[in-house]
Structures are given as C-alpha cells and as structure tokens.
Image: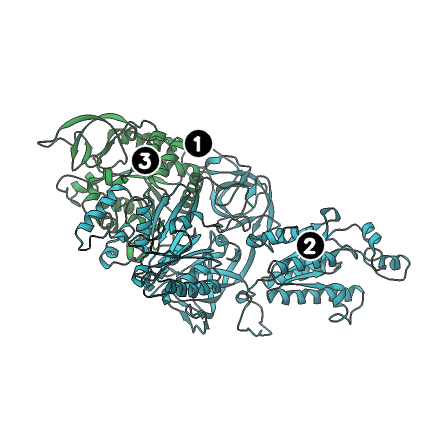
C-alpha cells in the first residue's frame, strides 16, 4: 500500500512527464511547439524535468507570425538557449512572400500559421509535435486525444479519432504522417498558474501587471504598438494590465490587473468568471466552429 | 486538497447525457460568464428560449448540427469537496469505441436512462462495458422524469431492472436518482417533484460517494518507458555514467534501495537511485508518480521491461486469455490475424488464436462468435504472443492488465482488451483437452492455493482450519485439504518412503489446482518436506495461471516435539517410527515462501487474519470481517 498520495499538481506533473517520455520513446524526430507563451514555457520546464539528467531530446519549433511582442522573442531565445535546445523558427512572412498564403483583411495572422506550421513539420521531418493546448480552453479542444493523429496533409479527422484507453497511446503511424501530442490536456488555466507559482517557471514579463498604452476594440483591451495603431474614434489610454495568453500581437487582448507575481495571477484566475480565450482572443470569437475548422486544416 | 474523481457518462443516444453535464457545470457555477452569455444569446434565437446545455460539451460542428455526441469531451470542474474530470461520452452505437475511451479511466459511471423510453440495448451495453473496464461505482440517473409524471412506480421498476443487470456484470455499488437534466430537478438541489425520493441530489451524491481509485491497491509495478542516455550530440551539461530508466509507478510503492526483479528476464537487482521529475531524490515513490531510477547491477533493460518487488511479481506468459472489444468498422477482429498488442509500455506482435465466444450484452448469453468480432462486439479470445508478455490480470491491475490491439497494416487501433489470465499455448499438443462451456473467469469467485508446509505438529492443520473458516465467513469459498485426512482416501495406497511422499505431494497439488480452478481457495496443510516437490506444485499452478502461495509454518522442532499431540515424535525417538520428518528424515524449508509464520506471531485466528490480508485473499469491503475481534 502506498503510504502517500500525490498532490493534485504532482499528479498532473507526473502525467505530463509520462506523456513527454512517451513521445521521446516513440518518435524519431519530435518537436516542441514553442511560442514563448506560458503553456509552452510550462511544457519546456516539464520536458527538462522529464529527461533529467539528459537534455531535452526535442527541437523547439516557433511558428513566427511576425506580429510579436519583443519581450516574448527575447524570452524565447534566452530560455531555449539555457535549456540547450535547438531552436527552429518558421516564419509566416516567408509563406506570404512566396505566395503560399495571402494576408487576411484586418491583418491578423493567427490563421495563416497553419500553412507555415505544416511546412515546418514537413521540412524538418518532424514526426511528433508537442503542444501546450489544454482541453479546458475550447469546445473542440475538449474532444482532442492526448496523442492526436494527423494524416499526410496534416489534417485532423475529429469524427475518426483513435480510441485512447488508460495510459496507452497508439503512436504507430505511416511515413509522412505525424502526431500532435498534448501533455497539458488535463490541466486547467488555474492549474497552469499554480504550477508556475510553485515551480518558479520563468515567463515573459507581459504576463504580469505592467503599464502599457492600450485601446478598446470589440469590447477588448488591445495593446498599442507599431503593429496596432488606433483607428479613427479609438482612444489610447495607459492602463496597468497583464496578458492571459500570448499570440498575434494585433489581436491578443490584455486585462486590467494589479497581479505582479504568479501567485497573484493564480488567485485572480481562480476568482475570474471569464474564460481565457473569451477574454483575450478576438479571432476565436468569429464563430463557434472557428477553432475546429482551423484544427481540421492542421492548426495547433 | 479535494480528491479527484473521474466520472464517465454512459447511456443511449438522446437520453440527455450532454444536457446533464451542461446542467451540472452550469448549476455548480463552473461555466465561465462569457460561455453562459454565448449560450443565452443562442437561446434567444430558439422558440422555447431554453438554454441548449448540450452545447457546453458538444464541441464539434457536426455534433451541434446533428444534435448528437460523436466523441468524448472532457470537462473539468471542482466543488469545495472534490475535483471532477467528467468524460461526456457518446451514446450512439456507432461511436461506442469513444465511450470505451472515456470509461477506461473512470472511477464512477454516470448512466443516464430516458425514463419515458426505459433502458435500451445500448444502456445495457454501456453498463456491461463499465463492468468489464473495472469501473466500481455506478450512478443511474433516470432522466426526463417530468415526462412520466414523476412516477415512483416507473422509477422503481426501471431502477430494479438496472440494478439486477449491473450486479450481474460485476458493478457492486449502484445508486439511483430521479432527475430532469433539462429542468434541473435533483441535480444540485433536491426536487419538490419527488417527495418519495430519500436520496441525495446528483451533485451531492458525486461529492460524497465512496470511491476507491482503481489500481492503488494492487501490486507495485514500474514499467520501463524510456532509457535516459546522454544527449548524442553537442556539449552535455551534465555528463553521467550510470544509465537511468524512466517510467511511472503503478499499483503501489517502491522505496529507494529496495530489491527488485526485472521481468521478463527475471534478473534481481536493487534500486540504486530513486528520483522524481527533475532528479529530486525520493525515499519512496507512489502510484501514478513519474520516476527515474538507476539499478545496482549492469543489466540489459529496455522499454517494456517491468520492475517489481521479488515477492509480488506479475505473470509472464505467451498465451493470454482476454476479453476483447472490436473497435473498427473496416477491420473486424479476426481469428488467425496478426496484431500489435500494446500492454504497459511494451509492444508485442500477437496472433488472435481463437475467439471463444461473443457476449450478447442484452441477455449475457455467450454465443458462438464465428471467425470475427465486428465493430463494438465483445467476446473472449485466446491470444498468443511471439514474445513473453509481462502482465497482471486486469481485475487486479488496470495498468498492467489492459491492452490495445493495433492493425500492423493500417496502424489503426482496432480493438482493446482486458487480460483474464494466462493459458499454455503448448498444452494439449498430444492430448487434446476438452474445453468446457465455462472457464475459470466466468465463475463467481476466483480460486487460489495456500500451501501450509512445516514440521509435524507445527500447527498447520489448526491454522488451515482457522483460515478456511475466516475465508468462508468473509464470503470467499474455501476448502481445507488436510494431508493426514487425504491419506485415508485419495492417498490410502501410499506409504512414507521418499517416493511415496513425493507422489503424495503431487496428488495434493493436483487436487488443490482443481479446487482453485473451480473458484475455491484451497488451503493445503501438509508436511510436504521436500523443496523440489513443492516447487513442482508451484510451477504447475503458474503454468495454469493460478495463484500459489507457499506459507512456511516455522515452528521450531523443540516446540513441535513438546506439543506432539499424536505422540509421533516420541515414537520416532524410540525407534518405533522410521523416516520421521524432523527426527530422522530431513525437512527442507522453503527458500522464498510468500509468508512465514512463527509461534510468536500470535494465536491461529490472529495469524490467519493477518495471512489472509497479506496474501490479498480478503480486502476492500471484506477487510472488517477479517480483522480479529
């Protein structure tokens, strides 16, 4: 009989470590999708713990929209260098320049990432891509397997997912097919923040309260930058804000907050009544099926 | 910290599972405000203005369009008392495999039945699957009670039918709740419409239900998942010489420094280092904990090997009897076909040697399966692996007893199964055995042999009698085979020479094996002085996949001689008796008995109770009965 049981966070950590090790054992060239956001930072932290005392046997792959927060890029370079992980950057701009995708009206590039992601996976010969997506984020994510199969074109078939029982993951696949793997599947936003606080996981500074010029658009607070200028009628004001997610800088909103430490953010998240994506992702609010459509095509 | 309960829904299509989950989430305050707002906006477009609660879990476009659930959705919520992971599974027959996915990790099955229609074939199939997957607790919600006028008679009639069925498939704890998921009756608050219902509303029931998480009480196992080596290229930050093995502990605990056996090779070594994620040194690692270990000896260990305590090892066999469920429409499970079998962290290539029967989940009748099991059909199969499989029977461990079958061509998951036990694929080459209609695993109890060995007058028969009585009182069929008694009948033709003694032990062993196969705990009390004879009995049990527990009743010869109830020692000393064990014939004590009991351990009743618990013959709900008064 075990004399002790794991705490909630320890159990989630062990499950994620188990999944990451399964990827390393079953894939010949795995990549860790690394945006510099908090979920990918947690994944990298977990991978470092999973493979102790060896280095992380993954390549870090960043799909760069070109619409970046400078502090996130700095963080990305520093943290991957310190972990001794090779960083591969695939640029959406290259696909736009080559005519493989066209800029969308409004200039938001989140959707365009799919083409770049699939190109990077195929060019890099990656057979598994680890992502920080969580099932609590959104309806179609709640349906996703931990080991999610993608066909040669990178497509997800939500009507025909492989059964996934216990902790057994079928990672077998044909050449050219790949797997998307989600070690944080069973984590909630609250769990992520409590883990960051407990483990001292490093994050880009914009996750914590700071002063920044913002404007209000479609009910959201958006950061003013070279990429996002006020339109006629929009007022720029300075607020103390923090970000809940990090994405395309032209459509990622922030929330007014005084939370300056991970523990303070965790407390705010626990008290919040608004979902992470509902609060801060303009592009997810276009339609109920927005995420599913993008995922079918090969999105994260 | 609130404990975590994993709940999977079950039931037919249109019984209201997604609506119920939506209601639970909404009424427990677990839905973010923006999602509630989306729901309210959508409701304004509907004629009845009712919230479409199923939208909270039916996350796929096709699901919303067709109004059915296709795949399992996971939702997370917590109350001050507990955390929940809810797997909302599809009711549609076609998507049963997705229900199996959701139920495989569940502690509680939440079964919905449309009270206006009653239980369907699919309701029974889901309850059967929950039983097969070892879900211990079931809560049956009779939904849409408003459509039957909140009738107690209707509730009682359907409820008793379902409880009968659930018991028959091995689900012991069943709770019934009359609800309306759409209107919210008896979900979070007790309903005024059911004054006759004395139980708790659903949420409170889920918060207070006693849940025994699967796997925690079984045997400690560490399946090697990944061999940690130095990074092949680039400068290494931490060069290390030892090899490390990473994996997740299941079923119990390991402590640093303890002896382990590596299976299937069977080599013994010690856990030199035991570390958690990030290399944190641990004294003890528990169920579900990811660890990294190094071994005291340089052994050839790879992914799929299993580490276990030497005195509590898993089984190793090439032939497996299992229950299987077919999960592919295009590729039925066919006898004679080859599959990859994923069990624990190992991948084996196996042949589905034969399909024994198919289960009719409505009547529980066992049918002739023919050559294949089609999509969602369940049956028993004999599987032969090219390589040795390390496993535990599923009923003792989910983690080392469940498996997945993958088609080597398509790479698709085409089936899943639970291992019942081992069978000998070589057996019956010369003599074809008659295979009966029922196998050991169909019987209402599972047998074992407890072999009490020791000097004459050591107290074997007294201990055996206590153990037999205790087991029977705890509801476990048992029978004492006393070595002395058998010599009056079955072994009346045998004397006390070494050859006859050997034959005597062989017959006792075969007799015990038959009793154990029939579902009894055979308690054998016999001097059985020679190690080799007892080892042969052990091997023949292992070959048959039956548990064998050797117990050394280690009473010193001086004590035995003092007791000497039959005056045999006196006779041997005076030369009246020849070849008496302990006097002029050797007693060879067991090298590695499962247990050793000594006079100082206490009286026979106390020792019998401790022994029954130690060997896992009683446990869980029977534990109180076994405790000494």
Q: Quadrant of residue A21 in the image?
A: top left
- Can see residue B624? yes
What SS does tag 3 mark? helix
- Can see residue A111? no
Name the subunit of mark 3.
Answer: A
Q: CA distance from mark 3 to mark 1?
A: 41 Å
Packing grade of label 3 (10 A; few <14, some 14-19, many >=20) is few
Q: CA distance from mark 2 to mark 1?
A: 52 Å
Packing grade of label 2 (10 A; few <14, some 14-19, many >=20) is many
Q: Position of B63 compared to A231: left or right? A: right
Q: CA distance from mark 2 to mark 3?
A: 58 Å
Percent of width and height locating residue A196: 37, 33
Percent of width and height locating residue B447: 60, 62
Camera-side mark, 2 or 1: 2
Chain that the image shows in cyan: B
Name the quadrant of the N terminus of chain B.
top left
Percent of width and height locating residue B5: 43, 48
What SS does tag 2 mark? strand
Q: Which residue is mark 3?
A: A271
Q: Quadrant of residue B534 in the image?
A: bottom right
Same subunit, labels 2 and 1: the answer reads yes
Percent of width and height locating residue B280: 49, 34
Disc sitting over residue B551 in the figure: 2
Disc sitting over residue B237 in the figure: 1
Same subunit, labels 3 and 1: the answer reads no
């Amino acid at each position: 009989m075990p004399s002790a049981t794991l705490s909630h966070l320890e159990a989630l950590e062990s499950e994620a470590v188990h999944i990451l090790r399964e990827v390393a054992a079953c894939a010949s060239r795995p990549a860790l999708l690394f945006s510099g956001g908090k979920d990918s930072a947690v994944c990298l932290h977990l991978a470092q713990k999973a493979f102790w005392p060896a280095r992380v046997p993954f390549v870090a792959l960043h799909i760069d929209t070109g619409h970046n927060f400078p502090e996130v890029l700095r963080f990305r370079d520093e943290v991957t260098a310190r972990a001794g992980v090779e960083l591969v950057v695939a640029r959406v701009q290259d696909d736009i320049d080559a005519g493989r995708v066209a800029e969308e009206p409004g200039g938001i590039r989140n959707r365009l990432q799919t083409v770049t992601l699939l190109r990077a996976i195929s060019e890099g010969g990656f057979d598994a891509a680890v992502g920080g997506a969580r099932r609590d984020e959104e309806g179609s994510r709640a349906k996703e397997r931990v080991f999610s199969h993608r066909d040669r074109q990178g497509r997800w078939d939500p009507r025909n997912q492989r059964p996934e029982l216990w902790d057994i993951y079928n990672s077998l696949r044909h050449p050219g097919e790949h797997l998307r793997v989600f070690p944080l599947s069973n984590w909630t936003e609250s769990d992520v923040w409590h883990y960051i606080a407990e483990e001292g996981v490093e994050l880009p500074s914009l996750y914590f309260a700071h002063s920044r010029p913002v404007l209000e658009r479609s009910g959201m607070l958006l950061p003013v930058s070279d990429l996002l200028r006020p339109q006629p009628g929009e007022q720029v004001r300075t607020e103390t804000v923090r970000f809940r997610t990090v994405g395309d800088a032209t459509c990622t909103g922030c929330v007014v907050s005084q939370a300056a430490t991970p523990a303070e953010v965790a407390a705010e998240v626990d008290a919040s009544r608004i979902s992470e994506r509902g609060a801060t992702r303009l592009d997810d609010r276009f339609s109920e099926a927005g995420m599913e459509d993008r995922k079918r095509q090969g999105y994260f | 910290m609130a404990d975590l309960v994993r709940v999977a829904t079950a039931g037919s299509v249109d019984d209201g599972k997604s609506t119920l989950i939506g209601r639970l989430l909404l009424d427990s305050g677990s839905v973010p405000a923006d999602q509630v707002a989306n729901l309210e906006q959508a409701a304004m477009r509907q004629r009845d203005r009712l919230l479409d609660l199923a939208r909270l879990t039916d996350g796929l476009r096709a699901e919303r369009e067709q109004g059915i659930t296709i795949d399992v959705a996971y939702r997370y919520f917590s109350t001050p008392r507990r955390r929940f992971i809810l797997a909302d599974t599809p009711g549609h027959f076609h998507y049963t495999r997705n229900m199996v996915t959701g139920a495989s990790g569940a502690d509680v099955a939440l079964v919905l039945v449309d009270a206006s229609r009653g239980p369907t074939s699919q309701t029974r199939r889901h309850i059967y699957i929950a039983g097969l997957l070892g879900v211990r607790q079931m809560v049956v919600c009779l939904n849409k009670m408003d459509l039957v006028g909140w009738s107690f008679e209707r509730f009682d009639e359907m409820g008793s039918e379902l409880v009968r069925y659930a018991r028959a498939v091995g689900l012991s704890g069943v709770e019934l709740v009359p609800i309306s998921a759409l209107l919210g009756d008896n979900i979070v608050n007790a309903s005024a419409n059911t004054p006759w219902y004395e139980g708790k509303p659903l949420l409170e029931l889920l918060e207070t239900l006693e849940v025994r998480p699967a796997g925690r009480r079984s045997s400690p196992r560490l399946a090697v998942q990944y061999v940690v080596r130095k990074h092949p290229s680039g400068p290494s930050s931490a060069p290390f010489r030892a090899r490390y093995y990473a994996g997740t502990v299941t079923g119990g605990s390991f402590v640093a420094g303890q002896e382990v056996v590596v299976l299937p090779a069977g080599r013994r070594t010690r856990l030199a280092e035991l570390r958690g994620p990030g290399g944190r040194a641990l004294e003890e690692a528990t169920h579900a904990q990811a660890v990294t270990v190094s071994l005291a000896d340089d052994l050839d260990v790879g992914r799929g090997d299993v580490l276990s305590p030497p005195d509590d090892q898993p089984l190793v066999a090439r032939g497996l009897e299992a229950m299987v469920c077919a999960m592919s429409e295009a590729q039925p499970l066919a006898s004679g076909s080859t599959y990859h079998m994923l069990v624990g962290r190992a991948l084996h290539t196996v042949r589905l040697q034969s399909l024994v029967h198919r289960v009719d989940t409505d009547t529980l009748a066992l049918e002739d399966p023919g050559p294949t099991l089609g999509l969602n059909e369940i049956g028993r199969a004999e599987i032969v692996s090219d390589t040795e499989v390390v496993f535990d029977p599923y009923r003792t461990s989910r983690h080392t007893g469940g498996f997945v079958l993958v088609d080597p061509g398509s790479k698709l998951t085409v089936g899943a199964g639970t291992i019942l036990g081992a069978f000998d694929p070589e057996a019956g080459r010369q003599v074809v055995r008659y295979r009966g209609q029922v196998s050991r695993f169909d019987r209402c109890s599972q047998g074992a042999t407890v072999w009490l060995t020791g000097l004459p007058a050591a107290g074997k028969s007294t201990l055996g009698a206590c153990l037999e009585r205790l087991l029977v009182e705890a509801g476990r069929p048992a029978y004492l085979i006393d070595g002395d008694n058998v010599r009056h009948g079955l072994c009346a033709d045998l004397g006390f020479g070494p050859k006859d003694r050997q034959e005597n032990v062989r017959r006792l062993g075969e007799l015990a094996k038959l009793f154990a196969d029939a579902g009894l705990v055979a308690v054998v009390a016999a001097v059985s002085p020679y190690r080799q004879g007892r080892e042969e009995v052990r091997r023949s049990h292992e070959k048959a996949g039956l548990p064998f527990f050797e117990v050394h009743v280690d009473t010193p010869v001086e004590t035995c001689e003092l007791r000497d109830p039959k005056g045999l020692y006196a006779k041997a000393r005076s030369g009246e008796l020849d070849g008496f064990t302990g006097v002029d014939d050797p007693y060879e004590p067991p090298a590695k008995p499962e247990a050793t009991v000594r006079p100082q351990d206490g009286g026979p009743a106390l020792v019998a109770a401790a022994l029954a618990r130690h060997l896992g013959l009683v446990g869980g709900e029977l534990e109180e009965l076994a405790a000494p008064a």
